Image (cartoon, rainbow, N blue to C red):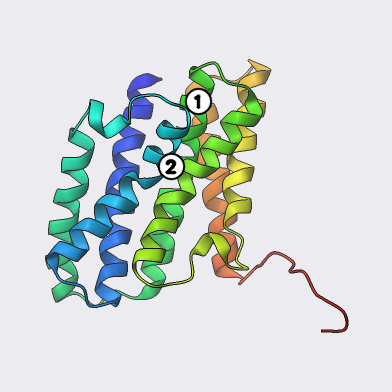
Amino acid sequence: MEHLLYWFDLIGIVVFAFTGVLAAGHKQMDLFGAVVLACVTATGGGTTRDMILNIPVFWLQDSYYLWIAAATGVVSFYLIRYLQVPMRLLMIADAMGLAVFVVIGTQKVLELGHSPAIAIVMGVMTGTFGGLIRDILAGDIPLLLRREIYATAALSGAAVLVILDASGKVPGEIVVAIAVLVTLTIRLAALRWNLSAPIARFGNN
């Protein structure tokens, strides 16, 4: 189980770092800007989680994560210079990173002995805060704050993981796979059919 989570973590780092470079490309940033955006996108959620929980920040314990994010940033920067990358790809890649990091974050917090509610909150934070920082630095409205179903997908995946884990009837690897699939499916469905959450309306507006 631990081995699976580690590889999922690395996949999430690569995917989110790639989304950082895509965002940088759409804003015509240079190599330095692209690598910075790649690194903060890949590590921002986990860093925030670890700081709140007052535990060692994951990439300070294992700098391999940071090196992978930076290397992905450099490779992706030159890759997108020669390929026409649609904005849609950024959204799909972000959905993949979201699904992986939500599940990783939730599972890690459960393993630390925190309550299911705390695990869900920290899982959602792990999955969304890297993209939040990326969008702010790129000068965009964060996906987390838009009408699109984003945080709802993260919340659903984290809740499914907690519920299945508490049941004790499903192997850990299957629980992780199902939670990733739930998060990814909801997010991709929202992108495919332009689904959005209801908004508050004031008066007759």
* Quadrant housing the C terminus: bottom right
What residue appears at the point 30 percent right and 44 percent down from the top-left corner? 13
Dot 2 or dot 1: first in sequence order is 2
| Circle 1 residue | 109
Label 2: element kind: helix
Q: Quadrant of residue 192?
A: bottom right
Residue type marked 1: Val
Are discs 2 and 1 less than 8 Å apart at CB?
no
What residue appears at the point 14 percent right and 49 percent down from the top-left corner? 71
- Position of residue 108 measured from the top left corner of the image (x, y, whole percent): 46, 26
Q: Nearer the viewer, mark 2 or mark 1?
A: 1
| Circle 2 residue | 100
Q: Quadrant of residue 150?
A: bottom right
In the image, residue 27 sits, relative to residue 93, either above or below, namely below
- Position of residue 16 measured from the top left corner of the image (x, y, whole percent): 33, 52
Q: Which residue is at the front of the view, 191 or 150?
A: 150
